[in-house]
Amino acid sequence: MTTMEGTLERIEGFLGIIIIIAIYFGIRFFFKRIANYTEVAGKNSNSLEELKEEIKKLNTKIESLENRINKDS
């Protein structure tokens, strides 16, 4: 019976190590997903700001063209 008990203890030890490794990889995967999401969100907000600036520039050009047309007519 002692060999059977020793074998069961070894199996429990290996299962414990495997569970700890699985939890580690699960947590790592979770935080990696969060990091990727925040990185993408940050890039989107930067491009949004660039688009807003471009729209402002285009609006000023439109206004200046409207003023030119109004002066000519």
Image: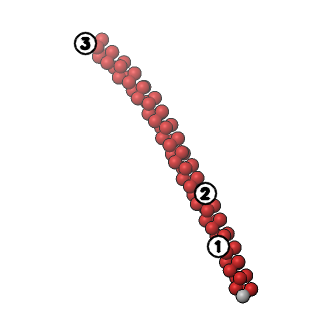
Instruction: Give the Cα distance between marks 2 and 3.
Output: 67 Å
Question: Is residue 69 found left or right of 37 in the rendered image?
Answer: left
The quadrant of the picture occupied by the N terminus is: bottom right
Depth order, front residue of 48/3? 3
- Image position of 68 with respect to 43: above or below: above
Residue at mark 1: 15
Closer to the camera: disc 1 or disc 3?
A: 1
On the image, the x and y values in percent for residue 46 come to 50, 37
Res 30 → quadrant: bottom right
Depth order, front residue of 69/37? 37
Scheme of colours in the image = secondary structure
Badge 2 or badge 3: first in the primary sequence: 2
Residue at mark 2: 28
Res 25 → quadrant: bottom right
Q: Residues within 10 Å of mark 2 (few under 14, many from 20)?
A: few
Q: What amino acid is at disc 3?
A: Ser
- Image position of 18 with respect to 46: above or below: below
Q: What amino acid is at disc 2?
A: Arg
Residue at mark 3: 73
